[in-house]
Image (cartoon, helix red, strand yellow):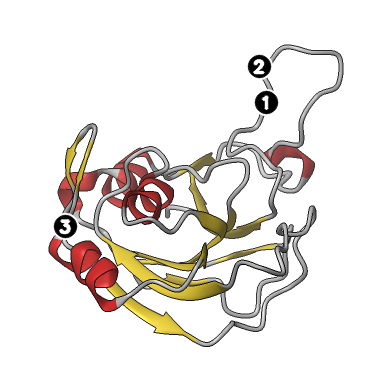
Amino acid sequence: MARLILFNKPCGVLSQFTDKGTGDSPRATLSDHVAVPGVYPAGRLDRDSEGLLLLTDDGKLQARIASPRFKTEKTYLVQVEGAPEDAALEALREGITLKDGPTRPARVRRIDPPELWPRTPPVRYRKSVPDCWLEITISEGRNRQVRRMTAHVGHPTLRLVRWRIGEWTLDGLEPGAWRDA
């Protein structure tokens, strides 16, 4: 039977088990948090993003979760700079054209600031620039897609937390912790 692990990836952790980067100081990786042999990430989260990362030992399940052709929905809680107007949100809902082509339509809504753990390092705060939280659901997963989408409509992402992948959620899972699905 396939093993599936839900992991709450903290900010600053690479979505891989080894650091092939250059430099004298190694960066944090999955191996600092998940000591389970034979599992691999089904998809990725950028080093500066947080939240749900699924790990499995089943290659077919990994492909089904990560491949855009299966259209697995992923929901993100996104803190953006500024206060997006309805036109910006509508553009995201209709799909926008990025450098690597058009995005599929996203589900987007404004939300109250969620009750999340403190981020390390903290998000920069600017007294003169407001921020806003959005819930964004996409069914593809290009490199830094949500960040590029919000920047495209004039509201750069300050904090990005993936809350849900398909039927699996981050609910009740602290940063750096994992559990079997």
Say left or right for 99 vs 124.
left
Q: What residue does disc 1 label?
A: 18
Residue type at the position of mark 1: Thr
Residue lying furthest front in this view? 128
Within 10 Å of disc 1 (Cα), the crowding (few <14, some 14-19, many 20+) is some
**At x 26% / y 43%, what residue is drawn?**
67
**At x 51% / y 56%, what residue is drawn?**
157
Say left or right for 92 vs 151.
left
Residue lying furthest bottom in this view? 112
162 lies above or below 103:
below
Q: Earlier in the sequence, mark 2 or mark 3?
A: 2
Q: Secondary structure at mark 1?
A: loop
Residue type at the position of mark 3: Gly
Q: Secondary structure at mark 2?
A: loop
Residue lying furthest right in this view? 24
Q: Which sits in the foreground, 63 or 22?
A: 22
**At x 38% / y 53%, what residue is drawn?**
146
Which of the labelled discs sits on residue 20, or is there none? 2
Q: What residue does disc 3 label?
A: 95
Residue type at the position of mark 2: Lys
Look at the numbered discs 3 and 1 and tell me whether their residues touch, using CB distance below 8 Å: no
Q: Which sits in the foreground, 151 or 173?
A: 151
Task: Please provide percent x and percent y for residue 2.
Answer: 43, 52
Task: Please provide percent x and percent y for residue 97.
Answer: 17, 44
Look at the numbered discs 1 and 2 and tell me whether their residues touch, using CB distance below 8 Å: yes
Which of the labelled discs sits on residue 156, or is there none? none
Q: Secondary structure at mark 3?
A: loop
**At x 51% / y 46%, what residue is drawn?**
45
Say left or right for 68 vs 156.
left
Give the mark toward the camera: 1 or 2: 2
